[in-house]
Amino acid sequence: MKYAFLVAWREYAENAKTRGFWIGLFMFPVIIFLSVSVSVLLEKKGTPVRHYVLVDQSGIFAAVIESRLEQLTPRPMPGAPASKAPQRPFQPASLPAMIDTNADLASLSRDLKPYLRREKRLQANGRDVDLYAAILIPRDIEKQIVRPRAKPGGKTASTNGIEYWSANLADTRLRDEIEQAVNGEIRRREYLARGMDSAAIREVEQTRAPFASLNPSKEAGQEAVSGADILRQWAPSGFVYLLWVAIFGISQMLLNNIIEEKSNRIIEVLLSSVTPGELMTGKLLGIAAIGLTMVGVWMAALFGVLTWKSGGGPDFAGPLLLALKTSKLIPMFVIYFLLGYVMYAAFILALGSVCNTIKEAQNYMAVVTMVMIVPMLTMPFIPKDPNGTLARVLSWIPIYTPFTMMNRVNADPPLVDLIGTMLLLLASAAAALWMAGKIFRIGILRTGQPPKIVEMLRWLKG
Amino acid sequence: MNTNPPADAPPLQLRNVTKFYGDFKAVDDVSFTLAAGSICGFLGPNGAGKTTTLRMILEIIQPTRGLITVLGRPSALEVRQRIGYLPEEKGLYKKMKTWSVIAYFAALKGLTRKAARQRAFELLERYGLKDFAAKPTEALSKGMSQKVQMLASIAHDPELVILDEPFVGLDPVNQQVMEDIIRDMAARQRTILFSTHVMQHAERLCERILLIAKGKMIFDGTIAEAKRTLPRRVRIETDDDIGPLRQLSGVISVAPVETARGAAGPNDSAHWELQIGENADPQAILQLCFAKGIRLRGFNQSDPTLHEVFMRLVGPEAREAAFR
């Protein structure tokens, strides 16, 4: 075992010097930090102010639209320190004097296009701004209102109804706000026209029954589902992703390492000093230590950033920290990481031992990657039905057990699933290691074409 | 565990060792014993079974049949701290520092990490590589890398050193350094077995050679004994008729010698080689030349070279096999 530890130490020391290791080590904390800090920053800074022009030839909707957009101005949090006055996210811009607001919509839109394409700029609050959107309401909009059971209106000057012009198709907030404001006003007018009390109707529309989400697994009196509970349900998915990245990343490291020794012909000198078993164990331990270091740093970074940001940071920091502290996520992550690693490392060791170059190994890795992609594809569905058929079936397939069970950890899976799959995983990992040992012993000294599957099966029997 | 061999145990002994790869017999009933402190050359054409034999000695692969005793033990792994090995296919960890590679292999052979590090620097300094100690091995030239590999294989001062083609790829200066390293070790009573294709190295270094072809041991003995397997020869240079020499007792054969000018016909050559029997006297040839008025431009008596011995013992069949 002394020699296995020596091999492990070299594996650890040499891999810890690689750029890939350090990128892997720091990438995750940086992502965590950025995702927390950027959301805080966005909250503080708010979204960028966007400018629009509204031409309401009907004269009906300008006021309600203005009033609705005014209501979007963020209000300062109670007790928050006084900072810059909050700004309206959507602000009106002045139309250039040469544009005739009484012209037909086709002419208006033609005149506005250079501004919408940002070829020209408009004035707003005394400075040049880009035009984000133009809302054109035709004079005859009332004739175009669509009513159930009513025949379509006669021929009108404009057939598009209200025209919303914008080059940004992804952000529909302004369009949605305006549509709701206009439709609200139209309905208010309809109520009036039909002799109905619109204020009474609004009151009726606001009546509701209280609705509470309760979790039967929680203690009596504390069954109400909080934000932390929802996070607890979804947090395992994040850990599945981490598990996948960690196992896949260090498996690649292991593969590169074996191929290097094989292609550089170092393996023969090693095998004159250590047994194939010691060499394999050393590699397995060394790379596992690299993985544990990486995972340890990731966990420390996650806790660090969440603890730092949980007071006064984004809304999810505190509940997520609580969810991590009060669940089995971390210990289960470490257990499934180690068992999953051993399982996949066994395949990689066998694969690396029979390949002479990275190129040869990549052909086989494509198959391994396809097999490994399944937990990623099923990851979003497991938390929705953590004890359903899909989750249970995948849990009992040893190569998917770590990922699926990790995803189910916070959903209290049946004990038979928890213990049974763990035992099966342990047995499968041991069997995979045994088989890998048999193939490694012969494959590592082999040169030339990689063996066929039948040949490898013969090695297993021998 | 006590790994000390019995006092009279030879450092290496092979008895009837055979290795099959499927139906192919790579090594066929090979037996030999090495004496302590000797340098032994292991010669043979490509594919003769040299590397397979060396790998079996080191227990990297198992023989199909036969017994191997290394430093008095049936398993080389039991005494791995006392064996040094330089394989035929050479390579180093590219990103590791030079000293670190030597120290790592020395540690794998039982040295403490501190002692291994100290030994690595000591060897690098002794063999002129001190300035490269802290450089990654990928910065070394091919010759330097090979020297570093050699140093890594002997850093733990092994009693038995097995070198598979140690001279391949080295320039004459580095070949000389490698020879010096081998002689140094032998001077300290280390036993060395090395395989080579270059007969000059074997001739210069070995007391004894083992010759293997098509998996079979075809010669085991000293260099002198090897040379005695071929008749002695006399080379003469003359334009006269050498017919009378063919009748002389002790002369086995007379043949024209191919020179740089090309092959000559049987009667127009100036260069001739006479093979003579073990007890024949070369002086008798000289006397007959004077007596018969054969005017000599050159007369040279020499033993056959190891290369010639090798070519003859290996035989055309094995030579063809080596090229396949």
Image: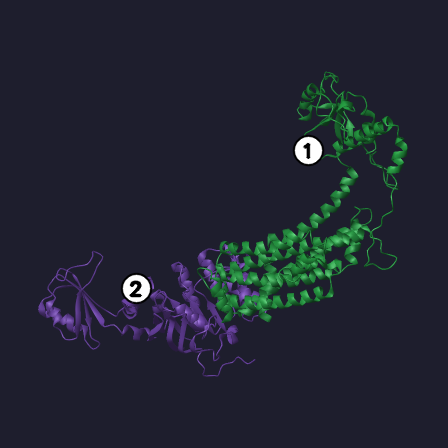
Residue tagged 1:
A169
Look at the image and name its color scheme: by chain
Asked whether the residues under the numbered discs 1 and 2 touch, taking CB atoms below 8 Å apart as contact, a structural biologist would say no
Q: Which chain is green?
A: A
Residue tagged 2:
B320
Q: In what element is the residue under mark 1?
A: loop
Residues marked 1 and 2, same chain: no
User: Residue A286 sits in which quadrant?
Assistant: bottom right
In this picture, is A167 found above or below A373?
Answer: above
Please state the chain letter of the residue tagged with numbered disc 2 in the rendered image: B
User: Residue A96 sits in which quadrant?
Assistant: top right
Q: Which mark is residue B272?
A: none
Position of residue A235 measured from the top left corner of the image (x, y, whole percent): 74, 53
Position of residue A50 measured from the top left corner of the image (x, y, whole percent): 75, 30
Q: What residue is drawn where x is 78% and y is 23%?
A: A142
In this picture, is A406 found above or below B67?
Answer: above
Crowding at mark 1 (Cα within 10 Å: few <14, some 14-19, many 20+): few
A323 and A30: which one is in front? A323
Position of residue A332 measured from the top left corner of the image (x, y, whole percent): 71, 61
Q: Is residue A432 left or right of residue B209?
A: right
Q: Is residue A118 left or right of residue A412?
A: left
In this picture, is B91 found above or below A204?
Answer: below
Q: Amino acid at mark 1?
A: Leu
A401 and A430: which one is in front? A401
Cα separation, mark 1 vs mark 2, equals 76 Å
Q: Amino acid at mark 2?
A: Glu
Q: Chain B appears what colour?
A: purple
User: Residue B106 sits in which quadrant?
Assistant: bottom right
In this picture, is A57 found above or below B202?
Answer: above
Location of the N terminus of chain A (image quadrant): bottom right
